[in-house]
Every structure is written in C-alpha cells, then in structure tokens.
Image: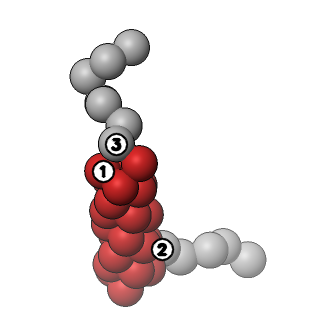
Amino acid sequence: MGSEFTTSDARELTSQWDFVTRSIARVKVEEGFDTFRL
C-alpha cells in the first residue's frame, strides 16, 4: 500500500509554507528584530 503525493497536496503545502514564512516575517517586523544583526 503506497502513498501518493498529488499536485493538490503540493499546492496545499506551498500555501501553508507561504503563510508560515509571512507570519514569521510579520512578527519579526512587529518585534523590531534586525535580521542582519548577529
């Protein structure tokens, strides 16, 4: 019994990844994080 990864699955994962990365970026801006400072 195999698992198939469909185009629909890929689109859903891409959408979720986009939401997560945008959310992280928004929090960084709101909290004033300087992404270039170590």
**In the rendering, at what x and y percent does residue 37 appear?**
32, 18
**In the rendering, at what x and y percent does residue 21 appear?**
36, 57
Q: Classify mark 2: helix, strand or loop.
A: loop
Q: Which mark is residue 32?
A: 3
Q: Classify mark 3: helix, strand or loop.
A: loop
What is the crowding at mark 3: few (fewer than 14 residues within 10 Å), some, or many (at least 20)?
few
Instruction: Answer yes or no: is residue 16 visible.
Output: yes
Residue found 53% across the figure and 76% down from its top: 4
Q: Which mark is residue 29?
A: 1
Q: Is residue 37 left or right of residue 27?
A: left
Precedes in sequence: disc 2 or disc 3: 2
Residue found 37% across the figure and 85% down from its top: 8
Q: Nearer the viewer, residue 8 or 15?
A: 15
Point out the image quarter for the N terminus: bottom right
* 1 and 3 marks in contact (CB < 8 Å): yes
Tag 1: amino acid: Val
Residue found 48% across the figure and 73% down from its top: 5
**In the rendering, at what x and y percent does residue 16 appear?**
42, 73
How far apart marks 2 and 1 lie (CA) works out to: 35 Å
Judge whether 6 appears above or below 30 on screen. below
Q: Nearer the viewer, residue 18 or 26?
A: 26
Q: Which mark is residue 16?
A: none
**In the rendering, at what x and y percent does residue 17 appear?**
40, 64
What is the crowding at mark 2: few (fewer than 14 residues within 10 Å), some, or many (at least 20)?
few
Q: Is residue 4 left or right of residue 30?
A: right
Residue 6 sits in quarter = bottom left
Instruction: Answer yes or no: is residue 17 visible.
Output: no
Residue, disc 2:
5
Tag 3: amino acid: Gly
Point out the image quarter for the C terminus: top left
Residue found 37% across the figure and 70% down from its top: 19
